[in-house]
Amino acid sequence: MSDSLPPHDVVIIGSGAAGLTAAISLAERFKVLVLAKGNLAQGSTAWAQGGIAAVLDKGDTFEDHIRDTMIAGAGLNRRETVETVIENAPVAIERLIAMGVPFNKEHDALHLTREGGHSHRRIVHVDDATGWAVQEALLKTARANPNITLLPHQVAIDLITGRHEEKFSGSGRVWGVYALDQQSGKINAHTGRATIIATGGAGRCYLFSTAPRGATGDGIAMAWRAGARVSNMEMMQFHPTCLYNLDVKNFLITEAVRGEGGHLKLPAGAPEAGERFMPRFDAREELAPRDIVARAIDHEIKRLGLDYVDLDISHKDPEFVRHHFPNIHEKLLTLGIDMTTQPIPVVPAQHYTCGGVLIDLQGRTDLPGLYAAGEVTESGLHGANRLASNSLLECFVFGEAAARDIMARWDEFGQVPAIRPWDESRVTDSDEEVVIKQNWTEIRRFMWNYVGIVRTTKRLERAQHRIQLLSGEVADYYGNFRVTSDLVELRNLLQTAELIVSSALKRKESRGLHFNTDYPEMLPEAKDTVLVP
């Protein structure tokens, strides 16, 4: 069964920082529907520990923040985007304070911490759980607005375009999204005159990731299938310091631990146990950008056959550590690690998707009526490597930009035409769902082994071959069996993996997060890798 629900003015897919920021602004004038794949607070925003970067200190300048962002991005950033986002950061922080986000203070001023790649202290934070506090404030504001409808447990399947109109137009105009209601099992057509994708990244393409379970590249895959370009998908950021624990596989140790003086060392049992190794790799030591630190850790692990390296902040005052990192400290204690007296075992893990759906400064994609904001996009802010704590900032600035552009252009958007309901008459339930689990596991494993921190052309070609084999299998399964949330995610994972590998094979250099030993040098000119459907 499938239903077509009454249209809202705007449909937003994703209930994190980008989606809710856009919804709150749009609700000044319009009826807004916000769809969440899981619970409303289940996305990446609530997982963000570190904070939000903004120029708020007297000794800091916009130009310094811009320069730091461009250096981290290895020149692949678009300068106009970087300027726009950074210059709008203080205003975004003011809006969050007005919503009740309790940023840490010191001597009646915002406490600013420092993270890798930043030349100044400019990270506002709420202890080590900034994302959770931001998500709570945004949700509280959205829930209180009668023009916003929040609908959890909706798995977006495909964007609604002209080919889904009752009077088939074949245009790329987007009118909303088909989504599976996980509680009723129905697939509904959620329509609006404008649609915003704010679905987050594609971290779950990899075996080890700090991303939440739902980060399966849904928005990127849907936009690609609908005809939008994607850019720089090879730029996949690996966070240097994920907790190494066989039972807890995605607990991030925030960059701020290094920003507040934590040292990376070789662990007990290693030939040079206790040695700080980052000085051998970069003059900025532990505060080098993430791509450099992640490759350094990867190098030491492979060179010495280690399972992990140590992140040690035990030389700092115990009360200082507990005060700055209360949640991490408490979590580690439950695992038998006291970070005030012991080092933390860490390994790199996939952390952030720097590429994505190509957008302009207003959040517009190639497709009329379709906008995007946040990690799902390639806006030009991050370039070849995201600077720490610029991610939530991007969500606020582009969520707001998309909302303002929709309001300014509203009269240009036509009325939603009659849309065909989802047709499930030809499919049946499957008794072979093991296929989904097998393919999911295989994708994540070969992406980790072949398309990880350090790449080779041969490994990338092996990954491409595996994707080609699996594509036919998944397409056949998708065409013959009833849609489930696991099947939707598998389809999107495979599509996103294909885009990552295709992009990586096109880049004949090493730049930022993309390091290929067959092309170790960086070319003189920075060029985006743009894929066209």
Image (cartoon, rainbow, N blue to C red):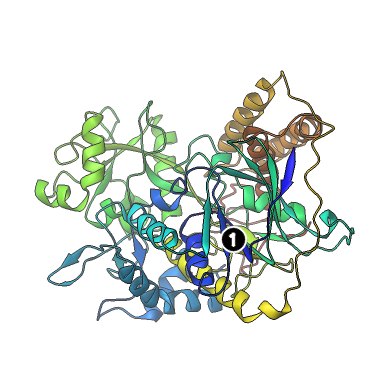
Q: Residue at x 63, y 28 (%)?
A: 442
State the quadrant of the C terminus.
bottom right
Q: Is residue 62 left or right of residue 184?
A: left
Q: Is residue 403 above or below residue 103?
A: below
Give coordinates of residue 209: x percent, y percent. 47, 40
Give the residue pinned by disc 1. Answer: 377
Q: Is residue 1 above or below residue 31?
A: above
Give coordinates of residue 423: x percent, y percent. 81, 40
* Front-lying residue, 502 or 358: 358
* Front-lying residue, 275 or 514: 514
Number of numbered callouts drawn:
1
Q: Residue at x 39, y 50 (%)?
A: 46
User: Toward which corner of the image does residue 115 lie, by quadrant?
Assistant: bottom left
* Front-lying residue, 321 or 502: 321
Whether residue 73 is visible, yes or no, is no
Whether residue 477 is visible, yes or no, is yes
Q: Is residue 383 above or below residue 427?
A: below
Q: Is residue 408 above or below residue 110?
A: below
Q: Is residue 77 left or right of residue 268?
A: right
User: Toward which corner of the image does residue 141 lie, by quadrant?
Assistant: bottom left
Q: Residue at x 43, y 58 (%)?
A: 143
Residue kind at label 1, given as amino acid type: Thr
Give coordinates of residue 76: x percent, y percent. 57, 67
Mark 1 neighbour density, 10 Å: few (under 14) some (14–19) many (20 or more): many
State the quadrant of the N terminus.
top right
User: Toward which corner of the image does residue 107 lie, by quadrant?
Assistant: bottom left
Give coordinates of residue 493: x percent, y percent. 64, 40
**What kind of element bears circle 1?**
strand
